[in-house]
Image (tube, grey):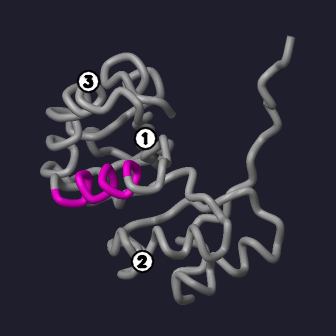
Amino acid sequence: MATKNTQPLFLLSTDTLSSYGLDLVFDVAKEAGYDGIDLALWKNFDSWNTSYVKKLVTKHGMPIKVVQTSDNINIKEMYKAIDICEAIGADTITINPPKIFNIKAYTYLSDNLKKLRDEYPHIKFSIINPEDATLFALPIPKYRFANIVEIIKKHGSYL
């Protein structure tokens, strides 16, 4: 019986080389032996161009495994991430958690993550570990992703 290859993938995130052009990032990833790309939409203007991103995947033979959104997520950015995932076959969207006082982004995610998971069951929605919530002598607002349990249980998201 054949078993599925479970070796970890090593991805190069485009946000680590944000001052480089996207074509050069793909080239660096291929030359360095990475298994794929983590495409940060918020770091490179070219990353919003689905047809250009598709061309780079083909040109370099370097798949995009993850599409990453900003901490200021909104409906436009989320649907662009979904569009890119569907166009190139990526199955994961990682979301940078909103900053502590970004009520709008937090509310968007809280109100829409379940609907998005139901509408796009082939895409995994993950929230990147939130920053430590240690604000001395200040109450932590309810509109933030405070801990891992909340992300996984309440919002049904991967971490």
Residues packed near mark 3 inside 10 Å, few (<14), some (14 to 19) or many (20 plus): few
Q: Is residue 142 visible?
A: no
Q: Quadrant of residue 20?
A: bottom right
**Rendered view: 118 above or below 138:** above
Q: Position of residue 18 (x, y in %)?
A: 52, 81
Q: Furthest-right residue in view?
A: 1
The foreground one among 25 and 154 is: 25
In the rendered view, does 76 fall on the left or right side of 78? left
Q: Quadrant of the N terminus?
A: top right
According to the picture, the residue beneath numbered tag 2 turns out to be 52
According to the picture, the residue beneath numbered tag 1 turns out to be 127
**Rendered view: 26 above or below 62:** below
Residue type, numbered disc 1: Ile
For image coordinates 48% across by 48% down, the residue present is 89
**Rendered view: 115 above or below 131:** above
Q: Is residue 66 magenta?
A: no
Q: What SS does tag 1 mark?
A: strand
Q: Is residue 146 visible?
A: yes
Judged by depth in the image, the label closer to the viewer, 2 or 1, is: 2
Q: Which mark is residue 118?
A: 3
Residue type, numbered disc 2: Tyr
Mark positioned earlier in the residue sequence (2 or 3): 2
Stretch in magenta: 76-86
Q: CA distance from mark 2 to mark 3?
A: 29 Å
